[in-house]
Image: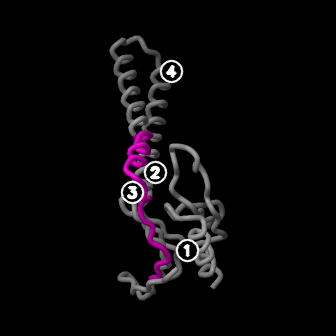
Amino acid sequence: MAYQQHPDTQSTAKRITLAVNGPKKCPIWEKILNSLPPFLMLFVVIMMIFVIVTTAKQNDADLIIWTFYTAAFLFCTYGFFFVLDNHIRLFHAQETISIQGDALVIDCIKSFMRRHKSIPLSSIRRVDHYDGSRGSSLTVPDTLRVYYGRHSRYRFAINMTYSDSSQLAKEIMKFVHK
């Protein structure tokens, strides 16, 4: 894995780029098939809106029914944005993992839920492989998880192979132990 050193424009510290990860390379039919979960979640949200409007026209709904509908709508809306963000990160995002000064910096452009994360190297406890949700249609593209602080963790390293992510984890831990 080659390193690129760039002078940081905001400080005198050096920037060492550890990895630049891009979108998943796959045939067009797989991209179309993996576009189904966001559309399905959008359909569910639209159906929730239809149910809420239909209930509002009846004028005899109790407060508990409105509370249930509102909670279900908010949950489905969050699910839609979660699935859409994972889809965008899987097929369109680009992630840069670098060391800037005394921090691990993870920038993910073309993603709307996670864009920039800066983690002090001194607070990193460990970096492990992340394999959550790998077998489902709601695939999470992250391959590593960094544990830092007392109870904080962050997933990153989109679309990397196991061997590449293992090498990246070792390189990050080298910087932590310096």
Between residue 24 and residue 27, name the one nearer to us.
27
Alpha-carbon span between mark 1 and mark 4: 46 Å
Amino acid at pointer 2:
Asn
**Residue occupied by mark 4:** 64
Alpha-carbon span between mark 2 and mark 1: 26 Å
In the picture shown, does residue 72 fall above or below 65?
below
Residue 159 location (% of width, % of height): 50, 61
Instruction: Give whichever of discs 2 and 4 has the lower sequence position.
Output: 4
In the structure shown, which secondary structural element does the residue marked by tag 3 occupy?
loop
Amino acid at pointer 4:
Ile
**Residue occupied by mark 2:** 86
Residue 168 location (% of width, % of height): 57, 73
Amino acid at pointer 3:
Ser
**Residue occupied by mark 1:** 120
Region rendered in magenta? 15-38
Residue 33 location (% of width, % of height): 42, 43
**Residue occupied by mark 3:** 111
User: Closer to the camera: disc 1 or disc 4?
Assistant: 1
Instruction: Give whichever of discs 2 and 3 has the lower sequence position.
Output: 2
Pointer 1: residues within 10 angstroms few (<14), some, or many (20+)?
Answer: some
Amino acid at pointer 1:
Pro
In the structure shown, which secondary structural element does the residue marked by tag 4 occupy?
helix
Alpha-carbon span between mark 4 and mark 3: 36 Å
User: Closer to the camera: disc 2 or disc 1?
Assistant: 2
